Image (tube, helix red, strand yellow):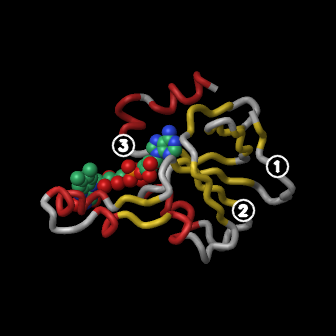
Amino acid sequence: MTPIASTQARPRIVIIGAGFGGLSAAKQLVRAPFDVTVVDRHNYHLFQPLLYQVATAGLSPADIASPIRGILRRQKNAHVILAKVSGVDTVRKEVVAEGRRIPFDYLIVATGPSTLISGTIGRLTRRA
Ligand SMILES: Cc1cc2nc3c(=O)[nH]c(=O)nc-3n(C[C@H](O)[C@H](O)[C@H](O)COP(=O)(O)OP(=O)(O)OC[C@H]3O[C@@H](n4cnc5c(N)ncnc54)[C@H](O)[C@@H]3O)c2cc1C
């Protein structure tokens, strides 16, 4: 498994999920003295409230999906990793995602409502 090289001295915040919650957290940190890494299994943010418009052919899928890198392109302290997270190593403080290990000092899990419903956090930590 390849560890992500880290040369930074600033505390690292890793945010899993670039939905409303994850992106909101990342943007709040724009002027904070942290390095922010956003990890999502998709390269786009999906505006879910307008899904019904796509289902009824009122909009095309591209109208409600925006590239995550585009949304955060002006935020100098943020970068984006496209990968599905499969675990969190809470001892080594690393997020495990498709063969990568992404180190963090602080972790924000924003993987959506299913986190609470199906116990995603528990599964993620056990698999690490
Ligand atoms: C059809 C529909 C209509 C809705 N309408 C409204 C509305 O009108 N008003 C309203 O307030 N709310 C509405 N909601 C609810 C609203 O969309 C959600 O509350 C909101 O999207 C939750 O945001 P979130 O950031 O918690 O999760 P999400 O927006 O679901 O984002 C989670 C992100 O985590 C990523 N992710 C998940 N697991 C992993 C993993 N293992 N590795 C990497 N990335 C991962 C996903 O790809 C996703 O980008 C609606 C929802 C739906 C489905």
Q: Check mark 3 vs ligand 1: CB closer than 8 Å? yes or no.
A: yes
Give 59 or 114, whichever is nearer the viewer.
59
Task: Identify the residue under disc 2.
Answer: 34
Q: What element carries label 2?
A: loop
Numbered mark located on residue 5 in the image: 1
The N terminus is located in which quarter?
A: top right
Q: Depth check: 27 or 57 in front?
A: 57
**Helix, strand or loop at disc 3?**
loop
**Which residue lies at the image location 13% right of the left edge and 60% below the top edge?**
56
Q: Which residue is drawn at 53% across and 60% down?
A: 25
Pointer 3 or 1: first along the chain: 1
Going by the image, does 29 lie left or right of 34? left
- The image's mark for residue 72 is none
Give the amino acid at mark 3. Answer: Pro
Indicate which disc, 3 or 2, sits on the residue closer to the N terminus: 2
Q: Distance between the residues labelled 2 and 1?
A: 16 Å
| Crowding at mark 1 (Cα within 10 Å: few <14, some 14-19, many 20+) | few
Q: In the image, which disc is placed on residue 113?
A: 3
